[in-house]
Image: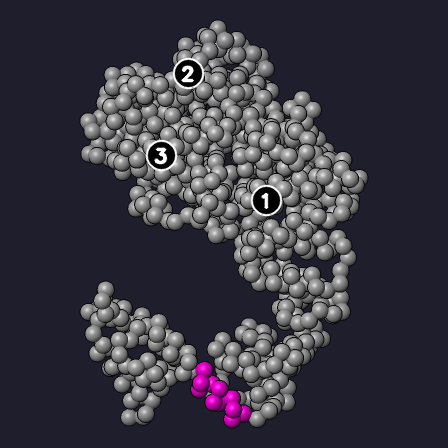
Amino acid sequence: MTEPARAAGTAAAWWRSVPAAAGGGAFDADGAFAAHTEALLAAAAAGDPAALLAAMRRSGLRDPDVDGLNAACREVRRDLVAGRLALLSAPQLRGLRIRALLGPGVPERLAAGLTHGLPGCSGIDPTDPLVADVVLAAMDGAERAALRRHAAETANDLGLPPVLVGRLLSATEPGWPSWALEALLAAAAAAATERNWETAATLYDRALREPMDDTLRLTTSLALGDAQLTCSPEAADRTFRTVLRTAPDGGALTVRLAAADRLLVRGDDETARRALAAAHHRTATAPPSHAGEPAALAALYWLAADRAGTPPELTSDRVPALDGAAADPAGRGVLAWREAVAGDDLDRTRRHALAALDPPAGAVVPPAVQVAAARALMVTEDFDAAEHRLNGLVEASRGAGGHAARPLAARAELWLRTGHLAEAERDLHDLQQCLPEQSWHPSALPRLRALQLMQLLATGRREQVGAALGEPLPPGSDQGVAWAYLLYARAVAEAADGHVDAAVRMLHECGRRCLSAGHRNPALLPWRSQAALWEHVRGDDTEAAALLRVERQAAERWGAAGTVTLTELRAALLHGDGVSRADRAVVALWAAMRGGWSAEALLTLESAAAGRPMSAAADAAVRAAARIGPGSGWSVRVGGTSAAKAARSVAVPRNAGRTDRRPVSGGDAGNLSAAQLRVAELAANGLPNAAIAEILAITKRTVELHLSNAYRKLGISNRSELSDVLYGAAGEHSPVC
């Protein structure tokens, strides 16, 4: 038997003889983990049993552990490589260093051109990271720089792709011909396309050390910030602030406003507010490069101030307040979100939002403001318009690193509101890829966690909910209004696990946070009706009734049908004998949400179905959902299977069966007012005028008036035609809806 074979046999036999450590040890009884351990150590020793045995001896042959042996293997191999290098001739060593510097994956043509005439070295693999590290460590900085320069020049002379040339240039000193800048930018863009953000940031930073014109320097700095958002968020903020401080210039307007917009991506709104105030003041002391620039900066400033929870009267930055009557499109986008948060005027909110999302030619509306306006549309339950705008914003931000996080988060919220849970999961996954949690500002992270929790709860993934609840949050996470959203989601999770007292405490704290931030609209967080359900379970019907009374008033003042009917459903569930009321509320909620169940509705119905014993009202609600829900999947609760679980098991794919039929009438539903559209949708879903009046808290005469005006605008005369116009012959939304 050869010495290596004996060494391998000795090592394996010794390792297998080691008693199992606490918690299962390195090898279990059936050897399943042993195979994994052997593979790991074989890789660490580079397949050299002598190196493995030497590492075992170096570790003392007592109480071995995989991590310790892995480190010992690397030490042994470094010593072996260093010993072999000492025996090489100078030409052999130079050839080895060139190969190590190039790394794996370079064209053989380049490697051959650089090592032409140099002897090879058998038994040493320069593409092995450990070998390359040892080889290059023996070189001083000047020698390494000279070798890199020679490699980059040779690659360019050979006509190799600029991406490869740029990678070779990344660690060189500046002062190259113009081809080097082109190569660096090409390599950086390629790394960004592959989402290799650290490499992209390194290459953009290196490119900025070469001479370039001012416009290119700004666009390169913006690209650097986009790459840094994912891997070095604080550095990204510094980069964006540097771009924003650039003197006003017509060619730089787009880049500067993009940098201003990106300051709001991570959620560090207080820092962004100060930087935006300074930028706005600079436009006052120097002529702005575009008439819309000061207004766009002011809109971003007030959006950051609102999100940071800074009351307008307490700011001292002297940025002009937004005037609803004279506001430009960007300002109206911020006003739309303010109106949505306050919950006072749905129609005005929608007008402001559409003014920001469909601005006149030449108007400047930053993406952050557009996202806020789209979220405002979402709260008005104009879901089609919100989806259309958010789709465009997501696509426009693809390839810009973490910049896509903001519209992805808003669209995930939209999917949860409309019951498209698979789409919500997809967007939340993509959001994590483009902006991981560690890149978010602590005060903004709770909103992301809240979206994740609601998606897991609505899809019934209880184990994953428990894991998500156990994930720690960084210090400062509980300082912003986003904390209220996480409190709400946590309360729903606690209630689902039977921890009613904890759920009620969280909901009341959620309410305090919302009210202190001016978030009074129950369409954002219906915390009062949720708390009322659990106050009822605790036996405090007086508190439950008080909570419901206030939320019903707020919901009716806002007027969105889904918000009103969700509150009504929860109120009906508190009355054990309110059978007809619960039935009617479920039908109205289904109609208001245009044939779908939001995450909130699913969880409310599941809570009703889980009651033991189930009240008559809860039974009526579940049966009504089974009667009208998507297909036959909505079955009544049988054998402990809740209606919500049944619905999830047959979730209809988004757009399934959707047609592109134009409406049968020449009318346009876009001409309807928000009030007319709400009434028309309920009527098209089969609700009588009296029920519509009750749902929307208006008179029957008002319903009739809205329907008459809707018929006139649409050029129709009855309910059956109304259904065709709004939903098409197949019952799906037509393009005008």
Q: How many marks?
A: 3
**Which callout, 2 or 3, points at the residue further toward the start of the chain?**
3
Q: Which mark is residue 695?
A: 2
Distance from disc 3 to disc 1, alpha carbons, whole Å, reads: 29 Å
**Which callout, 3 or 1, points at the residue further toward the start of the chain?**
1
Residue 273: x %, y % from top left: 61, 40
Distance from disc 2 to disc 3, alpha carbons, whole Å, reads: 29 Å
Any part of residue 578 in sight: yes
Distance from disc 2 to disc 1, alpha carbons, whole Å, reads: 44 Å
- Residue at the spot of label 1: 271
Q: Nearer the viewer, residue 712 or 270?
A: 270
Residue 282: x %, y % from top left: 74, 41
Q: Amino acid at mark 3?
A: Met
Q: Main secondary structure of the magenta part?
A: helix
Q: Which mark is residue 506?
A: 3
Dot 2 and dot 3 residues touching (CB under 8 Å)? no
Q: Quick check: 705 above or below 590?
A: above
Mark 3: secondary structure: helix
Q: Residue at x 41, y 19 (%)?
A: 550
**Which callout, 2 or 1, points at the residue further toward the start of the chain?**
1
Q: Residue at x 59, y 85 (%)?
A: 95
Label 2 or label 3, whichever lies nearer to me, is 3
Q: Amino acid at mark 2?
A: Ile
Apparent side of residue 387 relative to residue 167 in the rendered image (left or right): left
Q: Residue at x 42, y 16 (%)?
A: 695
Any part of residue 357 in sight: no
Magenta span includes 660: no
Q: Amino acid at mark 1?
A: Thr
Magenta span includes 87: yes
The boundaries of the magenta stretch are 78-88
